[in-house]
Amino acid sequence: MTRQNIVYVISDNWAPRRKHELKDESLRTLRAALELYFKPPLGKYQIVYVNTFEDILTNLFRRFSQNEDKVGNLIIALHGTEHGVKLPIFGKIQGFLNHKELQMHLAGLLDILNDRADTKRRFEDLRGRRIDSQTTLAFFGCNFGKNQQLMDDLREFLGGNLTVFAPKLKMRVNTPRAGWLTNLSFDNDGPFGLGAGGFAA
């Protein structure tokens, strides 16, 4: 049995552009840092660029349909604040979702999943068997960890057994450059450094 480690990067600006066509400098910087730090030989993660949370579930369904693997570490990179999160559930959104809005969108997604027998079965398998107490989900989004309700909503949607982490500080991403591997962190403690009070669980 293998545990898969995956990074999902959410932005409605990924498709249909290719890597070199990204117009948003912050997205190009984030992509370069993630690929440098997480992909082999330095890391053991697979990086997937998506537009919505539904895309993440679809990708997970496909990954676990032909094996007995479980979910290891999931990272979701997105924009966040202490008041809400820019997480399109199954379509584009104009701004940040607060607690009540996120609950409403997740309920709508659950209706979509339960409407078809195959997606209902796959979602039940994901929540009940593939995601367990050894699964961790980390959100890379500024101050996301200050909103416990949002974290709890997403934890419960995915079955409630996993551990969820999110930063309580502003996230910054600096372009990787010669002589410095990368500095993608929440403080001054190196790549993904935590520091005192850096994360909420």
Image (cartoon, grey):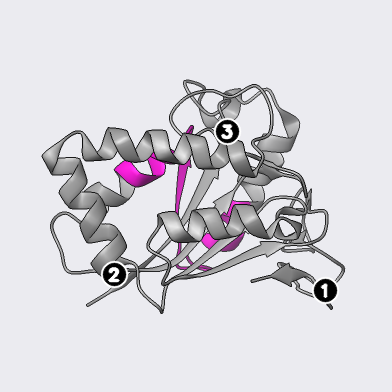
Front in this rendered view, residue 66 or 161: 161
Amino acid type at image mark 2: Lys
- In the picture, the quarter occupied by the C terminus is bottom right
Q: CA distance from mark 1 to mark 3?
A: 27 Å
Q: Residues within 10 Å of mark 2 (few under 14, many from 20)?
A: many
* Quadrant assignment, res 21: top right
Residue located beneath label 1 in the image: 189
- Can you say whether 188 is above or below 176 in the image? below
- Can you say whether 151 is above or below 62 in the image? below
> Residue 70 — which label?
2
Camera-side mark, 2 or 1: 2
Q: How many marks?
A: 3
Residue 145 is one of the magenta-drawn residues: no
Left or right, 162 with respect to 146, comes to left
Which badge, 3 or 2, comes first in the chain's sequence? 3
Identity of the residue drawn at 23% across and 56% down: 124
Amino acid type at image mark 3: Ser
Identity of the residue drawn at 70% across and 69% down: 200
Q: Which residues are magenta?
A: 34-58
| Residue 140: x %, y % from top left | 65, 54
Secondary structure beneath disc 1? loop
| Residue 175: x %, y % from top left | 77, 48
Q: Are marks 2 and 1 in contact (CB under 8 Å)?
A: no
Secondary structure beneath disc 2? strand
> Residue 13 — which label?
none
Left or right, 166 with respect to 14, comes to right
Amino acid type at image mark 1: Asp
Which badge, 1 or 3, comes first in the chain's sequence? 3
> Residue 11 — which label?
3
Q: CA distance from mark 2 to mark 1?
A: 31 Å
Residue 67 showing in the rendered view: yes
Q: CA distance from mark 3 to mark 2?
A: 26 Å
